[in-house]
Image (tube, rainbow, N blue to C red):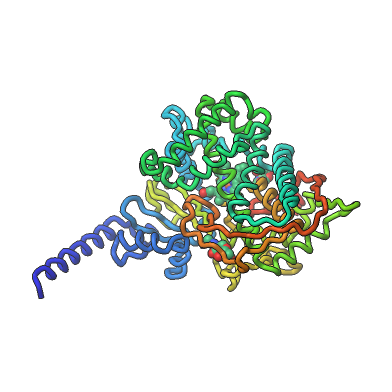
């Protein structure tokens, strides 16, 4: 045996023993068990990188723990599998904070000044601070009521007008993702920003598509100015456009949402120049998940003939036809199409890649049992809940568009297990706006167009390159698709009494039950 070999073996051996004792010495017995320590500190990070979005599901299946620790170089990560523990984490929103994460992202991603960052990052877990107040400010603008209605109505008008133009084109070949992305970007931003919407300018749209895919470079702060040069330039270009939008008071013609976003900044003494930067975060919330959600919704409906047939039959029952003019009502689509809504929720269950994240602000004994150390990260991956057989049954890997349709007599699945919009204090406030827009867009597509893949077969694109910050993944490649209007009838959308909420997440269902006096 060569002496080199002996040397290598002994170095490897002693390094291993060193890492193992380091792990044992630093891991408290009351902490959740640490897993994947074949080579301490190395195996977990290696497995995480190689398994991507499926990592947490695989670890759940392999170890079957309610909560576990991942020891990486740097602060530890606690990953939660058990639904009751998620509820516990959500209720301890000061000790286990989301706002602390938002504060650090604000500084890196949108590049606010030091003074602004001090305002945003001040007392992040105290009532009355900027980040704790934010959900309260936007709540009324994004919950059932006139502000939300006006915004949704405007978006849907934009969609209707655009689809009219596409129908006139006759049969066309589109790149499905790029096409959906453009339609939804315009519709959503028109609804929010009003007639002076900066995204009407193709240069602004292009800047967004240049900036957004590089978000992780900014989040991790890996010298984006150097390593994501184009994205950095696009960001600074957009800031200039937003400065003009706010300076000229264009937001006053926009939605309640954009007005409240200006108001909170004014109330906290943030100057308009910085409000312009903060709006990059606003655009991210509005666009980053709505666009892939719509893409997957269209994909699932059109690639599966059974889903398509069921959804279309249900929608057609609500279509009124008068002298060649077909009308569909928004409230019909929102409240009388259980299969369409179920398809949407199933898309979220099937495709959600979000992971709710918290930072432990202090040492915290979760449920009186598990020690979570100060400074560590807590992750609650949606995919783990969404593939739990004890909740969804044995067919969790299948796309079942009827899964969320309430059958008489059948027990409803625990709504808390549906995590597509997060939950607790960080429950997505934009879910009503997004859901309404996506349902109506899908409905109009089903009623008015046929979509067929140009090369004959639907193949689901992979999502390995999708940014990790997304709650829904962006496809890695596009699908060349033939779009054909089904008839030359005129289509309109009516808006009768549509200011009703929808039952999307557990919190909505609870509220509806109270309102009905049950
Ligand atoms: C299908 C589309 C959407 C999906 C899947 C989605 C998903 C989510 C998720 C999972 C969270 C929680 C993050 C966490 O707990 O870690 C969240 C938060 C948030 N979402 Fe959405 N979202 C969507 C659309 C929208 C839209 C259209 C808006 C704005 C109009 C919006 C505004 C927000 C805001 C402001 C927060 C942060 C809440 C806070 O600060 O506490 N979202 N979203
Ligand atoms: C989304 O749905 C498609 C089509 O069923 C599937 O191939 C893909 O794996 C899903 N993506 C994720 C991240 O779950
Ligand atoms: C439920 O209703 C209460 C009272 O109307 C409201 O304050 C709360 O924000 C609602 N929750 C959700 C998730 O809509």
Q: Is residue 360 left or right of residue 334?
A: left
What is the quadrant of residue 457 in the picture? bottom right
Q: Is residue 344 left or right of residue 495?
A: left
Tell me: residue 437, above or below residue 253: below
Point out the residue furthest to the left here: 3
What is the quadrant of residue 147 in the picture? top right
Q: Is residue 53 visible?
A: yes
| Residue at position x 78%, y 56% in the image | 336
Q: At which x and y percent is residue 375?
A: 38, 46
Quadrant where the N terminus sits is bottom left
In this rendered view, identify the residue nearer to me: 191 or 76. 191
In this rendered view, identify the residue nearer to me: 155 or 411. 155
In this rendered view, identify the residue nearer to me: 278 or 203. 203
Quadrant where the C terminus sits is bottom right
Q: Quadrant of ligand 3?
A: top right
Q: At which x and y percent is residue 159?
A: 71, 46
How many numbered marks have been drawn onto this rendered protein structure? 0
| Residue at position x 43%, y 27% in the image | 115
In this rendered view, identify the residue nearer to me: 202 or 333. 202
């Amino acid at each position: 045996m060569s002496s080199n070999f002996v040397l290598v073996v002994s170095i490897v051996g002693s390094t291993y023993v060193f890492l193992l004792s380091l792990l044992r010495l630093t891991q408290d017995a009351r902490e959740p068990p640490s897993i994947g320590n074949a080579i301490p500190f190395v195996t977990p990070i290696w497995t995480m990188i190689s398994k991507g979005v499926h990592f947490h599901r695989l670890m759940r299946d392999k170890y079957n723990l309610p909560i576990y620790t991942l020891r990486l170089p740097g602060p530890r990560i606690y990953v939660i599998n058990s639904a009751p523990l998620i509820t516990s984490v959500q209720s301890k929103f000061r000790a286990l904070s989301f706002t602390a994460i938002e504060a650090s992202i604000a500084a890196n991603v949108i590049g606010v000044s030091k003074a602004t960052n001090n305002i945003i990052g001040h007392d992040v877990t105290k009532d009355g601070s900027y980040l704790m107040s934010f959900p309260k400010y936007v709540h009324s603008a994004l919950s059932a009521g006139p502000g939300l209605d006006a915004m949704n109505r405007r978006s849907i008008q934009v969609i209707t007008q655009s689809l009219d133009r596409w129908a006139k084109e006759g049969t066309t070949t589109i790149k499905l993702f790029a096409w959906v992305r453009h339609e939804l970007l315009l519709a959503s931003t028109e609804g929010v920003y009003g007639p002076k919407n900066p995204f009407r300018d193709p240069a602004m749209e292009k800047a967004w598509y240049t900036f957004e895919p590089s978000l992780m470079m900014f989040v991790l702060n890996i010298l984006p100015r150097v390593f994501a040069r184009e994205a950095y330039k696009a960001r600074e270009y957009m800031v200039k456009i937003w400065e003009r939008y706010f300076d000229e008071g264009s937001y006053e013609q926009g939605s309640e949402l954009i007005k409240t976003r200006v108001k909170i900044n004014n109330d906290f003494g943030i100057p308009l120049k910085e409000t312009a930067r903060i709006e990059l975060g606003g655009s991210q919330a509005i666009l980053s998940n709505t666009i892939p959600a719509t893409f997957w919704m269209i994909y699932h409906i059109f690639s599966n003939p059974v889903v398509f047939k069921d959804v279309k039959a249900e929608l057609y029952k609500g279509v009124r036809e008068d002298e060649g003019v077909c009308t569909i009502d928004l409230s019909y689509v929102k409240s009388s199409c259980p299969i369409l809504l179920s398809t949407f929720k199933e898309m979220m269950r099937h495709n959600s890649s979000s992971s709710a994240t918290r930072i432990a602000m202090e040492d915290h004994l979760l449920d009186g049992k598990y020690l979570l150390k100060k400074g560590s990260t807590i992750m609650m991956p949606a995919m783990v809940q969404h593939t739990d057989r004890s909740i969804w049954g044995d067919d969790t890997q299948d796309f079942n568009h009827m899964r969320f349709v309430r059958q008489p007599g059948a027990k409803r699945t625990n709504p808390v297990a549906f995590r597509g919009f997060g939950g607790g204090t960080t429950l997505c406030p934009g879910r009503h706006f997004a859901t309404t827009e996506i349902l109506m867009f899908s409905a109009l597509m089903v009623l008015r167009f046929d979509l067929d893949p140009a090369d004959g077969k639907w193949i689901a694109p992979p999502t390995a390159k999708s940014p990790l910050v997304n709650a829904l993944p962006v496809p890695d490649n596009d699908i060349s698709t033939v779009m054909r209007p089904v008839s030359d009838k005129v289509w309109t959308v009516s808006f009768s009494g549509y200011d009703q909420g929808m039952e999307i997440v557990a919190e909505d269902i609870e509220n509806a039950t109270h309102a009905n006096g049950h």
